[in-house]
Image: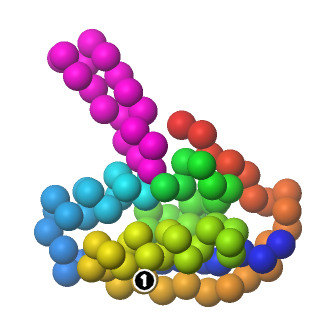
Amino acid sequence: MKAEIITYGTEALDNTKRSIISKRIFGYMDRTKGSRYTYKREGILDSKPHLVITKKTFIVLSRDGAKIKKMIKDQGVTVKSWKIEIAKKEMKKRYG
C-alpha cells in the first residue's frame, strides 16, 4: 500500500501558532463550563488511516498526503515528505 511519511518543523513559530497547528492536525478535547461538558474536536487525521511516529511525524496514505501537506504549509510551516510502501495491516484508524 502506498503511503507517505510527513514531518514538519515549528521551530520558527511562537507557542500559540504551534498549538493551533497541532490541534488542527490531531484534534483536542474542549472543556466548557468548568469542565462540566467535554467535546472532542476532530483534527484532520481523525478521519484518515494513519500512524503517529512522533509529535511532528506521521504516516498517511498517499491519497491523503496532498491535502494534509497543503493544510500544514498554509500555516507557514516547513513540510517534508517521503513516499513509502507499507503493509495494509499496519495502517490503523486512530479514534479518540
Q: Secondary structure at mark 1?
A: strand
Q: Nearer the viewer, residue 64 or 33?
A: 64
- Residue 30 pos. (x, y %): 31, 32
Q: Is residue 16 visible?
A: yes
**Total label count?**
1
Q: Nearer the viewer, residue 51 or 63?
A: 63
- In the picture shown, does residue 8 fall above or below 28? below
* Position of the N terminus by quadrant: bottom right
Amino acid on which disc 1 is placed: Val
- In the picture shown, does residue 3 fall above or below 50? below
- Residue 83 pos. (x, y %): 68, 85
Q: Is residue 28 left or right of residue 35?
A: right
Q: Quadrant of residue 12?
A: bottom left
Q: Is residue 54 left or right of residue 73?
A: right
Q: Which residue has dot 1 on it?
A: 79
Whether residue 45 is in magenta: the answer is no
* Residue farthest along the top direction in this orientation: 36
- In the picture shown, does residue 63 fall above or below 95? below
Q: Quadrant of residue 72?
A: bottom left
Whether residue 35 is in magenta: the answer is yes
The magenta span reads 27-43
What's the residue at 41%, 47% (across, down)? Answer: 27
State the scheme by which the image is colored.
rainbow
What's the residue at 52%, 71% (across, down)? Answer: 67
